[in-house]
Image (spheres, rainbow, N blue to C red):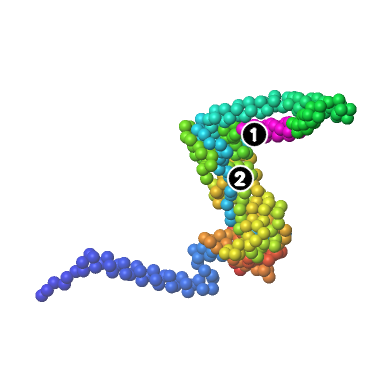
């Protein structure tokens, strides 16, 4: 007869555990039945008030509201443009010669009249000296005093011709009287008459020659002015205040003045600067000289610059249907440089209403911005489009109307809450 096998220890542990679970289920069911009329269990009552706390009256902080503000501002036209120098010059020369010395380099700041390049002046100096000698010779021959006016009768040659004429005329008059008395030979009388007529012609010719000589003297003086200018032109000077952008010649280089396109130095004036803007065709009627332009550059993101419209192109570009406008921008500290790309705002002579709300009222989730607005006693979440911010407020371009109340403490409310 086989002896009965006793259960193993592992089986006994599993059996005891199953009984405990069954008892717990029965106890839980009994507890739910017993508490049906008395209310929820204590551990559930301790959790539910926390979840329902936002819905209880007086549980949230003070909800602040503010009306959407409508502000009347001038219409601003946003444009792009670039800066250019007020003046840019390829400085050349009127005379040729060898470069004796250069006084500037790229980036040099010069004032009007400063010496840039010096050409060898010796050839021009010799020509000037020769011209001065020729003019002085004519002046002495004419017997001119530099401070006196020209009088042809005071020219020595004219005075001598005049004396000869007076003598010939006197002899001729005397011979005519003697001829009437038959007291002179006929041949001698004719000789005196011939001498007189010759003296008249010599005097007239001398006067004409003296006048011609005076004209030559005046021409020599004018030529001296040209020679002095040629000597001065050997010193190349700055035509205005500006910056040197390029030096094109070096010492010892020979410059030919008549060579087309020849230049010694390139310079530009950057105070003021010219701001060139392209205005759309539909806005051309609102553009006038004297309007204010404000602009920014990526080179100076924290600075804002101002200019004034000075020039408006009279014609619209056919290819782009746009108008070119130039504004003058003061640049006394040379902060801005030609060639910079800028984004500009041009104030027009008309106004528009803009809506502003406090920045604290706006909630952003990525690229989406929203505010809580009170409508019909209910707080509603409203998606809005935003513009620029200024002094704690931000511009709303769509989604709201003037006078609507927005919540400035959005962290205390939710969409659908009562006011």
The correct choice, above or below, for 160 with respect to 68 in the image is above
Q: Is residue 214 magenta?
A: yes
Residue at point 25%, 67% (across, down): 12
The rendered magenta stretch, by its main secondary structure, is classed as helix
Q: Quadrant of the C terminus?
A: bottom right
Q: Is residue 118 magenta?
A: no
Closest to the observer, 136 or 333: 136
Residue under pointer 1: 223
Residue 84: percent from left, percent from top? 58, 48
The correct choice, above or below, for 299 with respect to 62 in the image is above
Q: Which residues are magenta?
A: 204-228
Which of the numbered marks, if any, corresponds to residue 87? 2
The correct choice, above or below, for 179 with respect to 360 in the image is above
Residue at point 21%, 66% (across, down): 8
On the question of residue 152 being in view, the answer is no
Residue 318: percent from left, percent from top? 60, 64
């Amino acid at each position: 007869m086989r002896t009965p096998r006793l259960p193993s220890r592992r089986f006994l542990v599993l059996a005891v555990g199953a009984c405990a679970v069954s008892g717990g289920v029965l106890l839980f069911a009994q507890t739910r039945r017993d508490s049906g009329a008395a209310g929820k269990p204590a551990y559930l009552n301790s959790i539910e008030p926390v979840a329902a706390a936002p819905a209880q009256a007086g549980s949230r902080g003070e909800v602040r509201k503010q009306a959407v503000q409508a502000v009347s501002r001038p219409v601003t036209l946003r444009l792009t443009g670039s800066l250019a120098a007020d003046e840019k010059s390829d400085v050349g020369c009127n005379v040729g010669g060898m470069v004796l010395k250069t006084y500037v380099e790229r980036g040099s700041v010069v004032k009007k009249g400063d010496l840039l390049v010096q050409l060898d002046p010796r050839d021009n100096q010799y020509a000037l000296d020769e011209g001065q000698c020729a003019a002085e010779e004519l002046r002495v021959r004419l017997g001119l005093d530099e401070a006196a006016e020209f009088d042809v009768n005071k020219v020595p040659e004219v005075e001598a011709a005049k004396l000869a004429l007076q003598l010939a005329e006197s002899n001729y008059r005397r011979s005519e009287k003697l001829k009437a008395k038959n007291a002179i030979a006929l041949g001698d009388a004719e000789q005196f008459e011939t001498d007189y007529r010759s003296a008249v012609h010599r005097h007239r010719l001398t006067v004409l020659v003296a006048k011609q000589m005076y004209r030559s003297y005046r021409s020599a003086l004018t030529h001296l002015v040209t020679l002095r200018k040629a000597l001065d032109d050997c010193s190349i000077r700055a035509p205005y205040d500006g910056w040197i952008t390029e030096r094109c010649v070096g010492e010892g280089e020979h410059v030919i003045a008549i060579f087309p396109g020849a230049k010694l130095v390139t310079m530009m004036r950057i105070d003021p600067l010219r701001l060139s803007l392209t205005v759309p065709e539909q806005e051309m009627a609102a553009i006038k000289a004297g309007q204010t332009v404000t602009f920014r550059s990526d080179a100076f993101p924290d600075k804002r610059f101002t200019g004034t419209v000075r020039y408006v192109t009279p014609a619209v570009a056919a290819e782009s249907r746009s108008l070119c406008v130039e504004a003058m921008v003061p640049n006394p500290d040379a902060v801005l440089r030609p060639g910079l790309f800028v984004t500009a705002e041009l104030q027009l002579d008309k106004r528009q209403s803009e809506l502003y709300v406090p920045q604290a009222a706006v909630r952003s989730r990525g690229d989406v911005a929203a505010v809580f607005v009170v409508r019909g006693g209910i707080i509603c979440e409203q998606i809005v489009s935003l513009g620029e911010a200024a002094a704690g407020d931000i511009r709303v371009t769509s989604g709201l109307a003037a006078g609507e109340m927005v919540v400035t403490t959005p962290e205390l409310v939710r969409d659908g809450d009562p006011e």
